[in-house]
Image (tube, coloured by chain):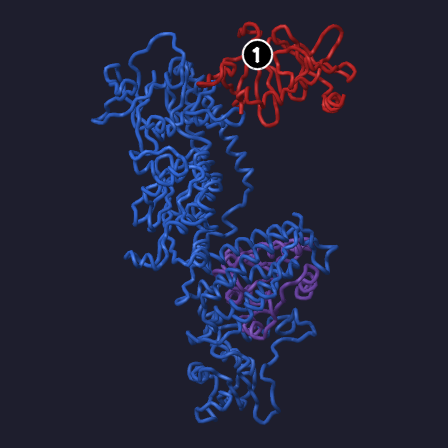
Chain colours: A red, B blue, C purple
Amino acid sequence: MNARANALAERPREYLTFRLGEEEYGIDILKVQEIRGYEQPTRIANAPSFIKGVVNLRGVIVPIVDMRLKFGLGSAEYNDFTVVIILNLGARVVGMVVDSVSDVMELSPDQIRDTPEIDSVVDSSYITGLGTLNDRMLILIAIEKLMGTAEMALA
Amino acid sequence: MSDTHTSESSGDVFDLSQFHGVFYEEAGENLANMETLLLETDESNADDESLNAIFRCAHSIKGGAATFGFQDVADLTHVMETLLDRLRRRELAITSAMIDTLLESGDVLKHLLASRQSGTDPGIDCTELVARIGALAHGTVAAPVAVPATETPVVAAASVVAAPTAPGERVLEIAIGPLDQPKFAENVVELFSEIPGLGTIEPTDDGQPDASQTRHFRVVSTVTDSDLLDLFSFHVSREQVSIRELGAGPAPALAPTAAHDADPTFGLFDDLPTPVAIEVHAPEALVVAAAKAELPRSADRSAPASANLESSTIRVPTEKVDQLINLVGEMVITQAMLAQTGRGLDAVVHQAMATALTDLERNTRLLQEAVMAIRMIPMTAVFNRFPRMLRDLSGRLGKKLELHTIGEDTELDKGLIEKITDPLTHLVRNSADHGIEMPADRIAAGKPEHGTVTLAAAHQGGSIVIEVRDDGRGLNRGKLLAKARERGLSVSDSMTDTEVYGLIFAPGFSTAAEVTDVSGRGVGMDVVKRNITSLGGSVEIDSVEGQGMRVSVRLPLTLAIMDGMSVGVADETYIVPLASVVESIHMTASDVKSVGGTGRVVEVRNEYLPLMRLDELFDVPRSVEHSGGIMIVVEAEGGRIALLVDDLIGQHQVVVKNLEANYRKVPGVSGATILGDGRVALILDVSWLVRRVRH
Amino acid sequence: MKMASILAVDDSASMRQMVSFTLRSSGYDVIEAIDGQDALDKIGDRHVDLVLTDQNMPRMDGLTLIRELRGVDRFKRTPILMLTTESSDEMKQAGRAAGATGWMVKPFDPQRLLEIISKVLPN
């Protein structure tokens, strides 16, 4: 109960939703700087395979992380429809490759539920809740926290 | 500004706090200047110019402090000024104790001002210090130089006499004393023979001073008392002269010179309008001396170049300069893109465009060099703190320390200067504390009693090399190895001397016999090294036991823009810093020799260099096998290696972008840049490559 | 009516700024100089109605400046005030001998400065 109250207090109202494999995720819209198509990044030697490299974003060097590779979802293709979400997480700017971006959704607290036992590729400690809208289920994740972890190998 | 003090009587109308900022800066400069001058003062031979300059520093701070109501600062500087005034007039001889006390006062002032500026309570009571300075100021009168330094030249004297105001002659009885030296009175007597028309003087005491060391004379003169006093004041102070007109009642010793208001803060010498009275004193002699109707221009004078002339410099906040540099950096990138696009055009058809692009490239380069130069400041900014520091250390450690500096005007980017200061400070402290021996030990070793710490800075290629050298005891290889083993570090006796000395940089390492607080226990050396490498630099130690030690720090001149050579490896492009490139050579597979199965070397000019294949190092994917290629010989950290790449693409300026801002430190990569086509290319960290080959 | 122009000479930037600000706020035209030499350079051929000068400055001090100015025809009658930190007889004597019109003790506040200026300037 307490956990939920806390989580509620922190939850943003608007979420950008995107697909990774079979699942749909939502992240705080305020963390999103822009959405771009995919351009071939400059490879960085000896980096984990899910870090594709770095790109030039108007003069700033930004690393690109392929979430599909990181979480072992489906096939990672790169074509004209490939989407990169550029995140501005305060301490860093990072781009993440996803399957597709859906829309921005506003969720009220009663549309969000606790989900301790969900079976998701993303570690449940980064899941802040499950949003439901019509028959869509959105896995809401704390993207800033996730990107800061050692396993993302960005720091 | 958090200081909201306003002037007492006009707080409503005039808010003086707007000037506080300027005052703080100016006071800071005066304090810094004063400290430097004090440190340079040779007690046995202090020169007038320095003493005057030191006086002016204190005087200037006092003026501002009093005006803006900073009473504590004003009080302290007032008593300092009193002491300094006596010193510059040679009424007192300067001693080491005075210099120390003045230095101490400077520190206190810094603190007081800083507290004011931040609106906090200084928490210092200056009473004792003020009293101490006062005592020094009223010490015994020493008289090394005969003539008290006043600023009125003798020439003015002639002018006064040229126009006497009193109608007739007067007979005066003049007493001069008490005198420490009778000859001052003789100087006064000589005035009467030097200056025509002054009058006559004869002693009434047979040339012997009385019990109070006072001489007595009889003077016949048409000159007024005040004018006489003016003249006498060259040789004796006014308080020592009393003039009495014979036949008249006792005249006051000092003729009142001004139209006295009850107001002591303002006065006129004569009633307005000023013309007549002034003209009488108008120095005909001076006019003759000046002999021109216009004012003398500075071209006529040998005006010493003053680095601090406000009229020739502008203060600019560093943020503005940084922004300017960023914008120029972006422009360099855009120009590169244009150049790239332009290459694809037919030069004949688009001749105007091609010419313009060439011009643009040149102008961009010049602009960028000029802008980078704005941020370059001389190493003096760093070296300046060390005289004081060594002096303090000398006292605390009981050692005799001397500082030599070489290459102070070598320039370095301001940002780097700020970051290199702490590491250098630590190195100097280290030399003073651990390197230089106690005076007795030095003499026993046949060395001069004074230990010398030398700071040297010089440009070398695209880098700056800063050395901290001392002539102390140097490093003992055996001790270092033993200590390292003790600490559990893996060492071997086959390590080279350089490697052994480098152990000092290992975390937690200290060879100090005892832990001292002066150099912070010696464990700071690992922090020193880390600070330096984070700036893209390197540090190395050299030593001869018994003779001394040398720490060499190498830094890139600036972090923002550099000359690079772009090289191709399969489909990827990398940048090699041009400053580290020695040469590039075409090669074939047969030029490569293998050593020990895995190592590879290549022969270059009768020397075998380790070879590194960039495609292997960076795991570059290849679709087709590539033989041959270009070999680039690079040098860093005193070592040379050869890098094997596919092609040389070109040479150009690159704007260095930080990879770690959003990503992390990548081994072998010192930064990134954006190529003309917008893609990112990685810049090689040549030092890392060289080090890697060594191990 | 055109306001008077005043030459303010002091090597302390904060003092200069304070004096200029005060005088300009009252409509005076102010020429600033950092020492005696700078003052002479800046004056050029201009006319100045009043000179305020500090004493202790590098390169050329106040007394020397006053003497130089008095050696020039058009400055023979200009009111020149010495800004001095004490009203010692010695300083006054020296100032008088150099040709100063009068003196003013530092520190002074802006109000006081204006009062004195208005006493000294004819209009």
Chain designation of label 1:
A
| Quadrant including the C terminus of chain B | top left
Residue B89 is situated, as x and y percent measured from the top left of the image, at: 48, 71
- Residue, disc 1: A71
Residue projecting furthest to the right = A110
**Is C69 situated left or right of B635 in this image?**
right
Residue B31 higher or lower than B284, as above or below: above
Q: Between B575 and C45, which is closer to the camera in this rendering?
A: B575
Residue A35 is situated, as x and y percent measured from the top left of the image, at: 61, 15
Residue B164 higher or lower than B366, as above or below: below
Determine which quarter of the picture holds residue C85.
Answer: bottom right
- Classify 10 Å Cα crowding around label 1: few (below 14), some (14-19), many (20 and above): some
Residue C61 is situated, as x and y percent measured from the top left of the image, at: 51, 64
| Residue C58 shows in this picture | yes
**Is A155 situated left or right of B65 in this image?**
left
Say which residue appears at 65% left-offset and 8% top-offset. Answer: A23
Determine which quarter of the picture holds residue B553.
Answer: top left
Say which residue appears at 57% left-offset and 58% top-offset. Answer: B109
Residue B83 is situated, as x and y percent measured from the top left of the image, at: 52, 68
- Total of numbered circles in the picture? 1
Residue projecting furthest to the left = B606
Say which residue appears at 52% left-offset and 70% top-offset. Answer: B136
**Is B390 situated left or right of C39 in this image?**
left
Disc 1, SS: loop
| Residue B300 shows in this picture | no
Q: What residue type is labelled 1?
A: Phe
Q: Between B213 and B175, which is closer to the camera in this rendering?
A: B213
**Is B166 situated left or right of B670 in this image?**
right
Q: Between B515 and A14, which is closer to the camera in this rendering?
A: B515
